């Protein structure tokens, strides 16, 4: 099979990307991915799409087969992954409908299988800068070209889920200056790095997190409002993804493809 160099993960409510796509099954050493991978073409480039929660959102965030998902993309030849995700805001200046192109994460999960190197081969990769700088630049440029309010950096707090934060937890996260909160960025981002695949996240802000309720001009979140913003965000992210793919015609200058070069003892 011809190598497919671009992979896209779908998040909550984002379960398909391409028309006239072929669905394929891939087995991995870590079991099956979340769903069949659909292969299609856009702007002359082959694209692999996989909804991380499954086709019917049957995988909660702590049960997603992250290793199988990344491994499957690697098997297909994927070199760049766009990983959008729904997220809540931890800061008043980041509003529902905004996009945040994250540059850092804070891992507050537990029990997730988060490495391909469980032994006897062990790798210690750097996660100082966990997202691909080149892919982030491209995401920011495409968001702004489309007129989307975009924050060009931000730290995402990754909680285990499936429950949301308490008000106390949320206020603690906000007090550190962290920008957004999500349930899936870890270990997805770091597994992509272990697989030496460029990875960028675009956090699609659907609501203010619990700790911000009661502050000036911030009203308690309602399901109706979240769904409205959610649907609007998913339409916007499709446009961003297609715009990014249109510009992915030359090799990246980043070091993601050499992440394991100095990782072994």
Image (spheres, rainbow, N blue to C red):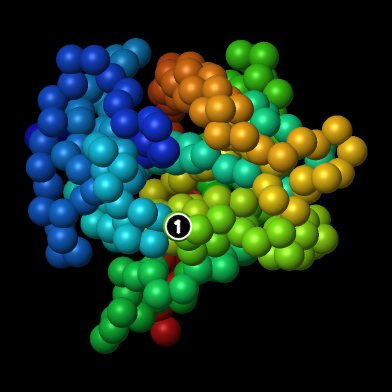
| Extreme-right residue of the structure | 216
Q: Position of residue 233 (x, y in %)?
A: 54, 25
Nearer to us in this view, 139 or 202? 202
Toward the viewer: 99 or 167?
167
Q: Is residue 77 left or right of residue 107?
A: left
Please determine whether, in this image, residue 66 is positioned above or below residue 51.
below
- Numbered label tally: 1
Seen at 16% across and 54% down, the residue is 32
Pointer 1: what residue?
Answer: 162
Q: Quadrant of residue 250?
A: top left
Is the N terminus in the top left, top right, bottom left or bottom right quadrant?
A: top left
Q: For this view, does 21 lie left or right of residue 49?
A: left
Nearest to the observer: residue 9 or residue 96? 96
Q: Secondary structure at mark 1?
A: loop
* Spot occupied by residue 6 in the image (x, y as percentages of width and height): 34, 33
Q: Give residue 181's position: percent from left, percent from top.
A: 62, 51
Residue shown at 78% from the left, 48% from the top: 212
Residue 147 in view in this figure: yes
Dot 1, crowdedness within 10 Å: few (<14), some or many (≥20)? few
Q: Position of residue 51 (x, y in %)?
A: 31, 39
Which residue is at a point 29% across and 83% down the rendered structure image?
119
Look at the image and tell me whether residue 100 can be seen: no
Is 146 above or below relative to 32? Answer: above
The residue under the point 45% across, 57% down is 162
Q: Is residue 167 shown above or below 81? A: below
Please identify the quadrant where the C terminus is shown: bottom left
């Amino acid at each position: 099979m011809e190598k497919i160099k671009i992979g896209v993960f779908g998040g909550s409510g984002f379960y398909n990307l391409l028309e006239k796509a072929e669905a394929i099954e891939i087995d991995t050493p870590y079991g099956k991915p979340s769903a069949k991978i659909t292969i299609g073409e856009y702007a002359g480039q082959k694209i692999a799409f996989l909804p991380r929660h499954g086709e019917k959102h049957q995988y909660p965030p702590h049960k997603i087969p992250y290793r199988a998902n990344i491994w499957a993309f690697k098997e297909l030849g994927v070199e760049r992954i766009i990983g959008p995700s729904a997220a809540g805001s931890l800061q008043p200046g980041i509003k529902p409908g905004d996009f945040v192109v994250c540059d850092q994460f804070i891992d507050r999960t537990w029990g997730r299988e988060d490495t391909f190197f469980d032994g006897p081969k062990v790798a210690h990769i750097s996660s100082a800068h966990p997202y691909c700088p080149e892919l982030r630049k491209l995401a920011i440029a495409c968001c702004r070209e489309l007129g989307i309010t975009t924050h060009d950096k931000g730290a995402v707090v990754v909680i285990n889920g499936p429950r949301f934060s308490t008000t106390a937890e949320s206020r603690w996260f906000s007090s550190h200056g962290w920008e957004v909160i999500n349930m899936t960025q870890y270990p997805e981002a770091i597994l992509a790095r272990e697989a030496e695949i460029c990875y960028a996240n675009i956090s699609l802000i659907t609501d203010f997190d619990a700790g911000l309720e009661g502050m000036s001009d911030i009203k308690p979140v309602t399901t109706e409002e979240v769904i409205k913003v959610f649907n609007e965000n998913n339409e916007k992210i499709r446009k961003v993804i297609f715009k990014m793919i249109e510009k992915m015609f030359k090799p990246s200058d980043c070091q993601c493809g050499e992440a394991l070069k100095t990782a072994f003892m």
